[in-house]
Structures are given as structure tokens and as C-alpha cells.
């Protein structure tokens, strides 16, 4: 009887040890899988005063801009620069960014590119950048040629031939068509978005972006 009791206790101990190990492993996997999400969410704090200010400035040429009441982390967008080097939004941390998705087959996109180029000329620098990401999926030399032919020289060239950036923004509820634009603050938090084109070189747009930069 004594032996059977000890054996039973041994089996229970083994079971408890296994359960504990699984729990620890599960917690470790969770910790490894989620730290960035938790950190990024914590960095995106609601700012009622800023939201009200941006709401006030979303008028005229940028009246269709939707201001975020509770900023969220920008999705993990991944694309390439003109040399084919991998780029992510983390590379722009520390500056306010206007992310714009465009394509040569999109007439409204083509129409607003000169204004985006002018916005980059006016405000571009260490504190702000226009990141226009081309999502043409064929004739991949065409976008660069189009920019050159149309005198777009201030914008850096970024592209995602698989258009995954559009899908990522769509899943975040920020992309419904083309062009799509998102304003991201220096901490990687989405402050505002726009479905459709805008006159980004206008006084209205410049005032809106300056307010976003002042966050």
C-alpha cells in the first residue's frame, strides 16, 4: 500500500510538473509574441487637445481628413526604397510622416503627386517626410519613369509591388480605395487618415501637418 501511495504521489507530481511547464512555456511564448504590440499601444495615448486642433484644421482642401480620437500604432508596413533595400515604418521613427499609397493606373493618385512633392519641399526634413509608396504590380519601371517625366523630384521613391501595404491598411480600416493617406506621428501613432486625393500643397494641408508635427 505504501509503495502504491508513493507511486501515485509520484504520478501526480509528474502531472503537476508537466502542467506547470506548459503554463510557463505558454507565458513565455505570449511574452515573446506580444511585447511590441503592448509597447506601441502604450505609446499611442489619446490627446483630446490635439484631436480637437486637428479637427478644427481638417477643412477646406483637407476637409475629408478623418482625425483619430484615440491614436493607434501604424500597421507594420514593409516596402522597398529605390535601391531595393527593405524599409519599414520603424525607419521613420522620430519624425512625423505622411504615408501615401499611389499607383500609375490611379488617375486621382497621379493628379495629387505634384502637391505631395511640393509638401515635401515645404516641410520635408528631420521632423517631417512624405513617404509615397507605389503599389504597381506590373511594369515596375513605369512608376519611376512617370515621376521623372512629371517633374516629381523631391519625393523619395518607395514601392511595394505586392501591394501588401494596402492590405495592411485595409485590415486596419484605413484603406478603402486609391489613393490612401495616413498621417503618423513621431512615435508611430496614426493621427489621421484620408480616403481619396487632396491638395496637399495648400495652406490648409500645411497647417494640418504643422499641427501634427507639434504633437
Image (cartoon, rainbow, N blue to C red):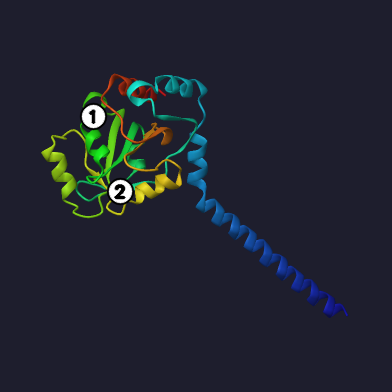
Q: Which residue is mark 1?
A: 115
* Mark 2: secondary structure: strand
* Mark 1: secondary structure: helix
Front tag of 2 and 1: 1
In the picture, measured across the screen, residue 110 lies left or right of residue 19, that is: left
Asked where in the image residue 151 lies, by quadrant, the reply is: top left
Extreme-front residue of the structure: 107
In percent of width and height, residue 164 lies at 35, 51
Q: Quadrant of the C terminus?
A: top left
Q: Which mark is residue 155?
A: none
Extreme-right residue of the structure: 1
Front-most of residues 9 and 83: 83
Question: What crowding class fits label 1: few (fewer than 14 Cα within 10 Å), some (14-19), or many (20 or more)?
Answer: some
Q: Which residue is mark 2?
A: 79
Is 193 located above or below residue 83 in the figure? above
Label 2 with label 1: CB-CB less than 8 Å: no
Amino acid at each position: 500500500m505504501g509503495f502504491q501511495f508513493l507511486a501515485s504521489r509520484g504520478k501526480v507530481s509528474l502531472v503537476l510538473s508537466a502542467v506547470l511547464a506548459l503554463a510557463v512555456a505558454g507565458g513565455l511564448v505570449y511574452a515573446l509574441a506580444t511585447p511590441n504590440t503592448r509597447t506601441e499601444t502604450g505609446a499611442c495615448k489619446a490627446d483630446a487637445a490635439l484631436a480637437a486642433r486637428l479637427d478644427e484644421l481638417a477643412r477646406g482642401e483637407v476637409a475629408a481628413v478623418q482625425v483619430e480620437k484615440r491614436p493607434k500604432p501604424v500597421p507594420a508596413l514593409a516596402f522597398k526604397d529605390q535601391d531595393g533595400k527593405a524599409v519599414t515604418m520603424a525607419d521613420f521613427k522620430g519624425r512625423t510622416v505622411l504615408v501615401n499609397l499611389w499607383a500609375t493606373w490611379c488617375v486621382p493618385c497621379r493628379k495629387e503627386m505634384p502637391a505631395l512633392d511640393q509638401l515635401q519641399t515645404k516641410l520635408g526634413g528631420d521632423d517631417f517626410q512624405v513617404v509615397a509608396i507605389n503599389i504597381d504590380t506590373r511594369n515596375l519601371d513605369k512608376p519611376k519613369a512617370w515621376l521623372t517625366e512629371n517633374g516629381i523630384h523631391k519625393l523619395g521613391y518607395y514601392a511595394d509591388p505586392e501591394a501588401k501595404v494596402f492590405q495592411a491598411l485595409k485590415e486596419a480600416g484605413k484603406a478603402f480605395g486609391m489613393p490612401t493617406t495616413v498621417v503618423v506621428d513621431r512615435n508611430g501613432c496614426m493621427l489621421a487618415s484620408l480616403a481619396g486625393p487632396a491638395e496637399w500643397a495648400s495652406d490648409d494641408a500645411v497647417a494640418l501637418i504643422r499641427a501634427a508635427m507639434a504633437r
